[in-house]
Amino acid sequence: MPMARNRTLKQSGVKKSGALGRLVTIVVTVGLTLGVLEALVRTMDGVAFAPRSFVADKLSLFASAYPSVYDPLLGYVPKPKFSGTANAWNTEVTIDRLSLRQNAADTPTPDPVAVLAVGDSYTFGDEVSDSETWPAQLDGLLGQPVANAGVFGYGLDQAVLRAERLVPELEPWALVVSFIYGDVRRTQLIQRTGVEKPYFDVVDGALVLRNVPPSRNRPRIEQMGVVRAALGYSYLVDWTARRLGATEWWYAGGFPQVKVHDDGPTVACLLMRRLKALEEKTGSKVLVVAQYLSRNITDLVSPKSVEELTGSERLLACAQQAGLATLDTLSSLRALYDADPAGFYSKYFLVAHMSKAGNRVVAEGVADALVELLGGE
């Protein structure tokens, strides 16, 4: 009996050893596979193999995809005199001394300019290089200098404040104010993705500017949490999160978006009156342009799309009531979708923003609207 018991113990040890070996094999195989995939996507996108936390980089750049600097009115602006591909999309980005994006790396923003464009990342041109943004393509279509003052992550309030700063300085013939409906939601925030911003309260039917200057304090990297802190060094995970549309969690989940009120639509409507006052004061004609997320074009019935489409329509109506010219890009984009539903997204959008071809559609619409607005000027 003792001998039999010893045999049983030995067999049990063999089984445990075999299970452990299989586990080690699985771990090593998975690790090697992930390592190969990591090397593949880095090579494909031209990302260096030096240690780097992609989440920390995102947050240290004021929660944006591009190098930025603090601004005491707006919260942040693109970093002046920056040039290169050190951004989340590895695209060619060139910023001039006024924090404007150039329309080409070797073409500084002219002075004076004919058209000034303000807005968010759709105007700045996230995911495309300098010459592929819609302001850059508008420059070519008009044969007149266009300045791109769009800024990634901006709310409509910040875009209007930036216009009020730049129009008197640049004296453009026309000011183009572009928005997606998300920019209206951002007017309700004092902090977005860990970055403080100015905002407007509505007091007795008028706008009152608050939180100026915004705090310079930025959330600590420790606030990322264990998962993002550990996985943030993997470009494969970063690459996957962006392509799955999980950036709201991946880049922003650990940082509160602090809402101060629910009056975004009212603030946005009143901002249209503020733009009209700017037009009357400076003589620069204002064109308000509605742009759209891909879901607003491909899915008209989802709750998010219904809210965004309805909200954009109402804001354009507010702009018209204020006496401003407007352009709705929805019909042009919808016609392209109806003509080729299967190929629409891949042709006109990238991950979350418009491609060169998509920006071309917007530029053509804006060019036609400006010719009508300015007439023979």
Image: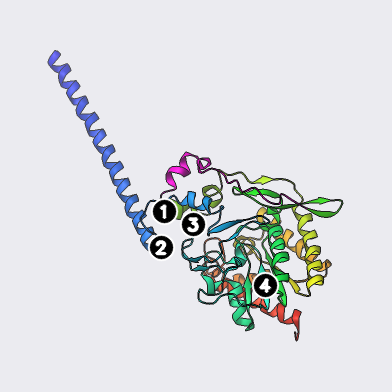
Magenta span of residues: 209-235
Q: Secondary structure at mark 3?
A: helix
Q: Residue furthest left?
A: 3
| Three-letter residue code for mark 1 | Tyr
Q: Residue at x 41, y 62 (%)?
A: 45
Kind of residue sitting beneath label 2: Asp
**Occupied quadrant, residue 42:** bottom left
Q: Nearer the viewer, residue 154 or 99?
A: 99
- Whether label 3 touches label 4, CB < 8 Å: no
The residue beneath circle 3 is 243
Tell me the residue that label 2 is attached to.
Answer: 45
Q: Of the residues tagged 4 and 2, which is closer to the observer?
A: 4
Which numbered disc covers residue 235?
1
Q: Is residue 325 shown in magenta?
A: no
Q: List x then y, in percent, for residue 64.
A: 55, 56
Q: How many marks?
A: 4
